[in-house]
C-alpha cells in the first residue's frame, strides 16, 4: 500500500510513496516551497516568484532569513526518512541559494530562477519513492542471502 499524494509541483517521481509517510508533512513542505519560490505570478512574462527573491532585496540578511525558512524543508525531509545523500544535496541547494542570493543586484534575479525549495521537495519525493521501490523489490526476491547448508546424514 502506498500513501496517496499528488504534488502541486507536478513532480514526476518513479514508484510509490510508503504508506507510513505523513502526507500532511509533505503538504507543509510543499506549502513552504510554494510560498518561498512560486507564490507570485509576475505579470506580462508568466514567471512565478516567491517571497525568497523579495526577501533577497535585503542584502545578506534577507537571504539568511529565507534560508532559515528553507531549512524547515530539509528538517522535515530528515524526519520523513530521506537518505543522508539526498539531505546533503538538499543542503547544497540551500547553500547555493543563500550564497547566490547574497550577491548584490544579481542575487535577486538568481533567487527568482534557482528555486532551491522546489528542487528540495522534488529531491525528497524522489528519494522517498525510490526507498519504496527498493523495499518492494527486496520483498519480491526474498530480500535475503541464500546460504546452502549441507547435512552430515
Image (cartoon, grey):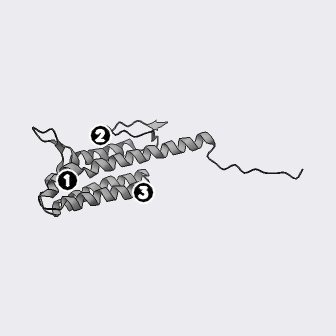
Q: What residue sits right under mark 1 in the picture?
A: 111
Q: How many marks?
A: 3
- Residue 54, above or below 133: below
Which residue appears at 41% of the width and 50% of the height? 80
Return the disc, 1 or 2, that comes first in the chain's sequence. 2
In the displayed structure image, the side of residue 86 where residue 69 appears, left or right: left
Q: Residues within 10 Å of mark 1 (few under 14, many from 20)?
A: many
Q: Residues within 10 Å of mark 3 (few under 14, many from 20)?
A: few
Q: Nearer the viewer, residue 109 or 64?
A: 109
- Residue 31, above or below 84: above
Q: Position of residue 135 (x, y in %)?
A: 53, 44
In the displayed structure image, the side of residue 145 where residue 99 appears, left or right: left
Which residue appears at 44% of the width and 54% of the height? 83
In the displayed structure image, the side of residue 143 where residue 111 appears, left or right: left
Q: Which mark is residue 9?
A: 2
Residue furthest bottom in the image: 60
Res 52 seen here: no
Q: What residue sits right under mark 3 in the picture?
A: 85
Front label number (1 vs 2): 1
Q: CA distance from mark 2 to mark 3?
A: 22 Å
Q: CA distance from mark 1 to mark 2?
A: 18 Å
Q: CA distance from mark 3 to mark 1?
A: 24 Å
Which residue appears at 32% of the width and 59% of the height? 92
Q: Position of residue 141 (x, y in %)?
A: 62, 41
In the displayed structure image, the side of residue 32 where residue 62 appears, left or right: left
Q: Position of residue 15 (x, y in %)?
A: 45, 38
SS class, disc 3: helix
Which residue appears at 49% of the width and 43% of the height? 132
Residue 129 lies in what quarter of the image?
top left
Amino acid at each position: 500500500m502506498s500513501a496517496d499524494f499528488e504534488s502541486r509541483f507536478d513532480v514526476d517521481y518513479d514508484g510509490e510513496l510508503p504508506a507510513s509517510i505523513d502526507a500532511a508533512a509533505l503538504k507543509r513542505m510543499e506549502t513552504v516551497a510554494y510560498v518561498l519560490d512560486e507564490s507570485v505570478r509576475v505579470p506580462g512574462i508568466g514567471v512565478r516568484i516567491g517571497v525568497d527573491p523579495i526577501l533577497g532585496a535585503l542584502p545578506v540578511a534577507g537571504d539568511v532569513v529565507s534560508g532559515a525558512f528553507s531549512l524547515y524543508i530539509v528538517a522535515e525531509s530528515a524526519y520523513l526518512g530521506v537518505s543522508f545523500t539526498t539531505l546533503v544535496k538538499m543542503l547544497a541547494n540551500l547553500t547555493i541559494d543563500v550564497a547566490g542570493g547574497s550577491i548584490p543586484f544579481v542575487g535577486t534575479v538568481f533567487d527568482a530562477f534557482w528555486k532551491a525549495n522546489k528542487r528540495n521537495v522534488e529531491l525528497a519525493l524522489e528519494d522517498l519513492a525510490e526507498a519504496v521501490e527498493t523495499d518492494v523489490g527486496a520483498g519480491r526476491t526474498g530480500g535475503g542471502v541464500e546460504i546452502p547448508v549441507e547435512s552430515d546424514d
